[in-house]
Image (tube, rainbow, N blue to C red):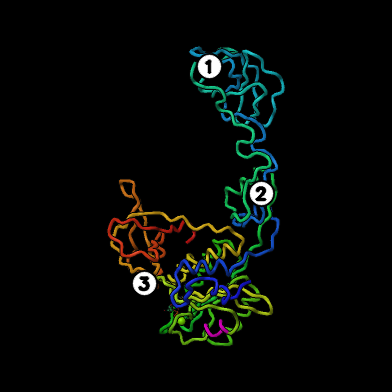
């Protein structure tokens, strides 16, 4: 486990007072180590979990050549150029039952989708293509060629082939694939626990009466939602007032129970509060001014309690800044902690429907609404007021326009990158 000082020394040109968004992720990749513990879980319990070992297919899928259609199976050697083919139907092969008796020259077998292709037969003509005449069918010339409508043994996966790789997060398709291999369970990393609390004397919990100068806590709810969708166990520690004893107790309790701690508020420059002092006292923490908007101030490191340490993400207080810093930094870091293979989000390109003012030298995340234009191209407009306290803008947006560190102002019609929310937000 590396200290903040060691990581800082490894990163060229590291400046905590002006750290780029990209550098933040480099830093976190060095700070965060995947959890070691693994467990075997039944397939139904594995949704959203991260594979701890490659899954190698113990069987071939499908396990036998089979019909892809309801139709008639025959030997394509009988097909003649420019001539219809007449075949005698000798029986019916159903899915799940092997057809045992031989099918000779001039004969065919009615076959259902998924039924095993009997030996010697290689082609299926769909029911709707043939004419039935008594116990015979006539296959018109040109409707099928050799090998049509037959699924081959192992065409999905051959026995011994890797089906899924360690570090992959299991989604619905992966669950189905694992089940298709006949595997009742898989080895996954254990779930991680993330504790979070909001700080600030002006922050009201739900149920408290409004009072002058106070605002209701929204950060715990957005963080709860983001964490839950990420598939971690959450520990909600409420609102912690700006009192050293309460903060200390909260940090110690969180570090004892959780793998990571997320706080919001109390890390900006002008703060006359105790949050930063307590982080410094209880842990190994870097305090940054990130060259980004929204979300400049941020604290990152580890808090240690009774020999056990937890990662710390001290996020800014502004509601949009919390969500943006979570998406840009915390989410990839937690995925790494969960054992996941880093997969940077695929940014989509859209034409900006408006001019955007931007200074090179910081990354900006503007709330965007992407839509498809009548000509088929994608356009994006902003949600309007980009204030870092305007949480409504996150609800209206379907993605974040990412204006990269070196990028300058954008003219109408320029292509910009967008990080789509895709069910994450
Ligand atoms: P801070 O980073 O503590 O200076 O907070 C920046 C702004 O975010 C202030 O206007 C705070 O009132 C607001 N804020 C801080 N925490 C929360 C929270 N949990 N919910 C809503 N607003 C917050
Ligand atoms: Mg504050």
Residue tagged 2: 55
Say whether mark 1 is within 8 Å of ligand 1.
Answer: no
Counting residues from the N terminus, which is met first, the one under dot 3 or under dot 1?
1
Counting residues from the N terminus, which is met first, the one under dot 1 or under dot 2?
2
Q: Please name the residue shown 43% across and 57% down the image.
A: 420
| Real-space Cα separation, disc 3 to disc 1, in angstroms | 70 Å
* Residue 412 appears left or right of 10: left
Do callouts 1 and 2 mark residues in contact (Cβ within 8 Å)?
no
- Rate crowding at label 2 as few (under 14), some (14 to 19) or many (20 or more) other CA atoms within 10 Å: some
Marking on residue 387: 3
Residue tagged 1: 139
Q: Please name the residue shown 40% across and 62% down the image.
A: 402
Q: Which residue lies furthest to the right in this view?
A: 100
- Rate crowding at label 3 as few (under 14), some (14 to 19) or many (20 or more) other CA atoms within 10 Å: some
In the image, residue 173 sits, relative to residue 279, either above or below, namely above
Magenta-colored span: 276-280
């Amino acid at each position: 486990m590396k200290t903040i000082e060691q990581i800082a020394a490894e990163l060229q040109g590291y400046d905590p007072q002006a750290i780029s968004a990209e550098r933040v992720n480099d830093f976190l990749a060095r700070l965060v180590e995947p959890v070691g513990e693994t467990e075997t879980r039944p397939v139904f319990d594995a949704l959203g979990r991260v594979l701890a070992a490659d899954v190698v297919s113990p069987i071939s899928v499908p396990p036998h050549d089979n019909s892809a259609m309801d139709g008639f199976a025959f030997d394509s050697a009988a097909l003649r150029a420019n001539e219809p083919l007449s075949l005698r139907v000798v029986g019916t092969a159903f899915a799940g039952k092997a057809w045992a008796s031989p099918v000779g020259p001039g004969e065919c077998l009615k076959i259902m989708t998924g039924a095993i292709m009997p030996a010697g037969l290689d082609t299926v003509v769909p029911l709707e293509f043939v004419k039935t005449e008594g116990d015979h069918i006539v296959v018109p010339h040109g409707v099928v060629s050799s090998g049509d409508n037959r699924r081959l043994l192992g065409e999905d996966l051959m026995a011994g082939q890797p089906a899924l790789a360690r570090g992959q997060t299991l989604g619905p398709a992966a669950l189905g694939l694992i089940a298709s291999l006949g595997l009742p369970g898989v080895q996954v990393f254990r779930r991680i626990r993330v504790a979070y609390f909001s700080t600030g004397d002006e922050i009201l919990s739900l149920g408290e009466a409004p009072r002058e100068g106070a605002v209701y806590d929204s950060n715990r709810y957005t963080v709860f939602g983001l964490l839950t969708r990420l598939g971690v166990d959450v520990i909600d520690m409420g609102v912690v007032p700006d009192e050293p004893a309460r903060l200390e107790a909260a940090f110690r309790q969180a570090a004892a129970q959780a793998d990571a701690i997320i706080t919001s508020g109390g890390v900006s420059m002008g703060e006359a509060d105790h949050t930063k002092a307590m982080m410094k006292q209880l842990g190994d923490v870097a305090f940054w001014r990130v060259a980004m908007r929204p979300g400049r101030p941020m604290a990152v490191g580890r808090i240690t309690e009774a020999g056990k340490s937890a990662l710390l993400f001290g996020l800014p207080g502004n509601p949009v800044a919390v969500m943006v810093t979570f998406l840009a930094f915390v989410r990839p870091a937690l995925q790494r902690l969960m054992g996941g293979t880093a997969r940077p989000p695929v940014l989509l390109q859209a034409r900006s429907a408006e001019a955007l003012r931007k200074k090179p030298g910081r990354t900006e995340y503007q709330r965007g609404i992407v839509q498809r234009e009548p000509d088929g191209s994608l356009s994006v407009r902003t949600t309007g007021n980009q204030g870092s306290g305007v949480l409504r803008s996150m609800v209206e947006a379907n993605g974040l326009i990412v204006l990269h560190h070196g990028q300058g102002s954008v003219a109408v019609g320029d292509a910009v990158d967008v990080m789509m929310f895709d069910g994450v937000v």
